[in-house]
Image (cartoon, rainbow, N blue to C red):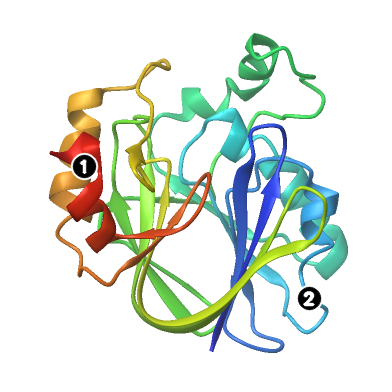
Amino acid sequence: MLRIITVVVTPFQQNARFLFAGEAQGAMLVDPGGEVERLFSHLPVSAGPIEAIVLTHAHIDHGGGVAKALALAEEKFGKRPTLYAYGAHSELRQRIGQQAILFGLSAAEYSNCPEPDCGVAEDDVIEVGGFQAQVLFTPGHAPDHISLYLSHAEYTSDTVGPHNRVVERGTGSGPLLLGGDTLFAGSIGRTDLPGGDHDLLLKSIRGKLMTLPDETRVLTGHGPDTTIAAERAGNPFLR
């Protein structure tokens, strides 16, 4: 049984996520955007060490806490996790501090992201603690954007809101997509930031995501989950 714990972090209200397959199984952390100490406080004691940190793209709201998360995980578990991110566009990871200044935030709170230990590309597989995630290259919102696809999982999910209370619980079975900022409930990712490309984003969504099974649950980078079926039927940006 896969456990998914979503923690809403930072003023960007970004969904950072832990995934682990059971007690003492290694965990994956996706997009630790910030508030890393608070984020780690919601990883159950029963979970194993964080073995992998995955960055879907190098925007401040998703990657601003990666450096701290790597350091804190090594301090807590005695071993540094493997960092996975798209292999190219290292310049984006080195501009997170600049992004903080542009947003009027403290550069001390949002660090530049280290280079990945493992640069990934389309169809690579990340295996952690008994489950596997396929990498989909989904640029458009950002040129380095990846998504993660699990073809089948039995799962439970908890969402922890900004005030450290569980605001949603659920169970499910079926395919899962960790879509970062490509696709949202009723919307799509913005493309007005440097490196954004609206046409390329639509190509990624239509060519990579809309080909997934209808029942695929989409775990979004911000806001509520959705499904491929719901977005195919009702997303106004995909008509």
Q: Is residue 4 left or right of residue 139?
A: right
Nearer-N-terminus badge (2/1): 2
C-alpha span from label 2 to label 1: 35 Å
Q: Which residue occupies the foreground of this view, 135 or 33? A: 33
Q: Position of residue 101 (x, y in %)?
A: 69, 11
Q: Is residue 114 left or right of residue 200?
A: right
In the displayed structure, 17 sits above or below 44; it is above
> Dot 2, how many residues are within 10 Å of its Cα: few (below 14), some (14-19), or many (20+)?
few
Residue under the image location 49 percent in, 25 percent down: 92
Judge whether residue 114 can be spotted in this image. no
**Badge number at residue 86:** none
Q: Position of residue 84 (x, y in %)?
A: 50, 53
**Badge number at residue 204:** 1
Q: Amino acid at mark 1?
A: Ser
In the displayed structure, 237 sits above or below 146; it is above
Q: Secondary structure at mark 2?
A: loop
Q: Quadrant of the C terminus?
A: top left
Residue under the image location 50 percent in, 46 percent down: 221
Residue under the image location 76 percent in, 47 percent down: 162
Residue that carries the numbered disc 2 in the rendered image? 44
Q: Is residue 95 left or right of residue 226?
A: right
Q: Which residue occupies the foreground of this view, 118 or 197? A: 197
